[in-house]
Image (cartoon, grey):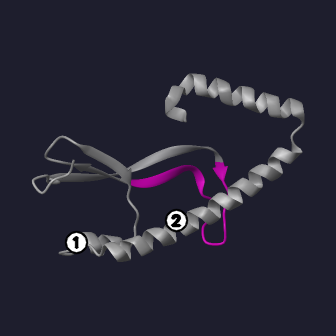
């Protein structure tokens, strides 16, 4: 449990570079994205031995909140709700595309897909779920 005596004596940032399965195309803003992705990560260390790692968003307002004397919880809830809304839109699109893809599969292809996923789960254990 977090108490007033807990502190964050250190934090570090790093870039998590991952390999894509194939070269990603370009869009209206960027040229070809390449075959790798880069996520800015932050690692927090506490004085009680608890560590946390997560993706570091470049939201200037959130950064300003962290540097302020007091966090405006209501404003952060609004920002989080906006992000959640964006993610809900993405999830809806992903599910619609998955359903469209699923309709194109034959029963044999669906069975093969399920078998491949089950094999993948065996290789990676419960951490994949």
Q: Is residue 33 magenta?
A: yes
Residue under the image location 76 percent in, 32 percent down: 113
The relative height of residue 128 versus residue 10 in the rendered view (above or below) is: above
Residue 86 is left or right of residue 112, and the answer is: left
Residue 122 is left or right of residue 38, and the answer is: right
- N-terminal of the pair, mark 2 or mark 1, is 1
Instruction: Find residue 84 and name its label.
Output: 2
Residue 106 is left or right of residue 75, and the answer is: right
Label 2 vs label 1: CA separation? 23 Å
Residue under the image location 71 percent in, 54 percent down: 95
Give whichever of 71, 68 is nearer the camera.
71
- Disc 2 secondary structure class: helix
Residue under the image location 20 percent in, 51 percent down: 2
Residue 86 placement (x, y as % from top left): 57, 67
Instruction: Mark 2 and mark 1 in contact? Answer it, CB < 8 Å.
Output: no
The relative height of residue 116 versus residue 10 in the rendered view (above or below) is: above
Instruction: Find residue 56 and name its label.
Output: none
Using a 10 Å C-alpha cutoff, classify the residue at mark 1 as few (fewer than 14 neighbours), some (14 to 19) or many (20 or more): few
The relative height of residue 47 versus residue 56 in the rendered view (above or below) is: above
Residue 60 placement (x, y as % from top left): 36, 74
* Residue bearing mark 1: 67
| Quadrant holding the C terminus | top right
Give whichever of 31, 42 is nearer the camera.
42
- Disc 1 secondary structure class: helix
Say whether residue 60 is visible. no
* Residue range corresponding to the magenta coloring: 23-40
């Amino acid at each position: 449990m977090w108490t007033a005596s807990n502190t964050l004596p250190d934090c570090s940032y790093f870039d998590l570079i991952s390999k894509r399965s194939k070269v990603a195309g370009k869009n209206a803003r960027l040229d070809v994205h390449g075959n790798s992705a880069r996520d800015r990560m932050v690692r927090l260390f506490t004085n009680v031995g608890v560590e946390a790692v997560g993706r570091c968003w470049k939201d200037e307002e959130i950064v300003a909140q962290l540097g302020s004397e007091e966090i405006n919880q209501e404003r952060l809830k609004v920002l989080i709700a906006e992000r959640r809304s964006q993610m809900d839109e993405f999830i809806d699109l992903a599910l619609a595309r998955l359903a469209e893809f699923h309709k194109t599969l034959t029963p044999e292809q669906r069975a093969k897909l399920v078998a491949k996923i089950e094999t993948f789960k065996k290789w990676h254990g419960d951490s994949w779920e």
